[in-house]
Image (spheres, helix red, strand yellow):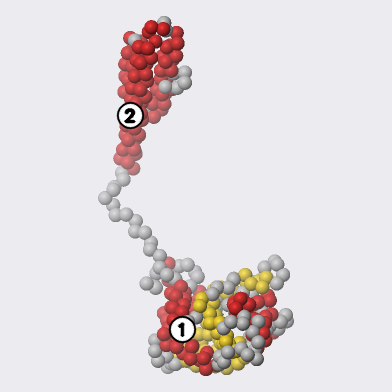
Amino acid sequence: MTDLSQLQEQADAELAAVADEAGLEAWRIKYLSRKGLLPQAVDRLGALPREERAAYGKAVNVLKQSVQSAYEARVAALHEASLAAELTAEGLDVTLPGRRPQVGRLHPTSRILRDVYSIFAHMGFQIYTGVDVESDLNNFQLLNMPEGHPARDMWDTFYTLTPGVLLRTHTSPGQIRVMHGHAPEPIRVILPGKCYRYEQVTARSEMMFYQVEGLAVGENITFGDLKGTLVAFADQLFGEGRRLRFRCSHFPFTEPSAEVDVDCIICGGKGCRVCKYTGWLEILGCGMVHPVVLRNGGYDPERFSGYAFGMGPERIAMLRHGIDDIRYFYNNDVRFLEQFA
Ligand code: FA5
């Protein structure tokens, strides 16, 4: 038993003298490792005469627990001391103000998209999404642009290595997808999404931008319905009393077709740099769905008619905020983005 008391004293004294983690590890190996002094003391139990074993066993257990908990307390104390030393050495000033986290904001395109969704939802339109990677069939052929059609040049794009698979140039192929899913039921939907074009990037044209397509198909739908819908939309988006101008145009998938301008928000129609001194700004293309496209979508053009339109939300955001270069939108420059609170 005196051996055990000596062992306890020796272990305690050496532990108290330990000054760093390396010393602590050496102490642990000496006393607690598998062949350390403590396991050796436990092993001696087997060699003792039977009548001494119970008392020795009890004492060696008490010793084991006491040494183990002294070790754990020393580990914690040393850890705390080294942390405190580190903090003092680094001179951490906890009274300094923290770094302000950068709070994100909605992108100007997302803001316009949300406004557009809300206005059309109130007019009873449902929102659908198509796919960015489209087939040549939906992007061109079923929209009345067979292979070799000259209008394809206007909407050149990026092609994948799989023949007939490309990045869509407009949201119009979504018209085909919705018609195939609903024919012969009436349709009233908008289709937002990204479009891609292989063309020169300029102040007004990006190679990746958003469009919002609109499509209504049913019986007795007329150009008057298209005009009424777009005038109501413009009133809500730009404020009441804006003038809209429907200019004759051509799209292979609508007949008749038009481009729609709004009187310049910046100069009120007098003429300025943004509207190139015309007083008008183009916001979308539209028209009555071509009979060929209706048939391709599964609708009988003798019975059904419809209108469609496609607008560019970035161009609308440019109008609303007087932004004179579309390239700011996707440069990811926080100095531009943080201006739209
Ligand atoms: C089309 O893409 C037709 N699909 C629109 C349409 C739909 C017509 C349904 C009839 C019926 P267009 O290429 O003009 O048409 O593009 C429509 C709108 O998308 C433009 O008015 C413009 O707002 C936007 N847009 C087109 N090209 C770009 C571009 N490179 N960068 C940014 N916006 C663009």
The type of residue carrying mark 2 is: Ala
The x and y percentages for residue 116 are 46, 79
Q: Residue at x 66, y 73 (%)?
A: 135
Circle 1 SS class: loop
Residue 73's disc is: 2
Q: Quadrant of the N terminus?
A: top left
Q: Earlier in the sequence, mark 2 or mark 1?
A: 2
Crowding near the residue tagged with mark 2, few <14, some 14–19, many ≥20 C-alpha atoms within 10 Å: few
Q: Residue at x 49, y 88 (%)?
A: 230
* Left or right: where 299 falls relative to 98: right
Q: Residue at x 63, y 90 (%)?
A: 303
Asked which quadrant contains residue 234, the reply is: bottom left
Q: Considering depth in this image, is 288 or 200 the residue closer to the camera?
A: 288
The type of residue carrying mark 1 is: Met
- Residue under numbered circle 1: 123
Q: Is residue 144 visible?
A: yes
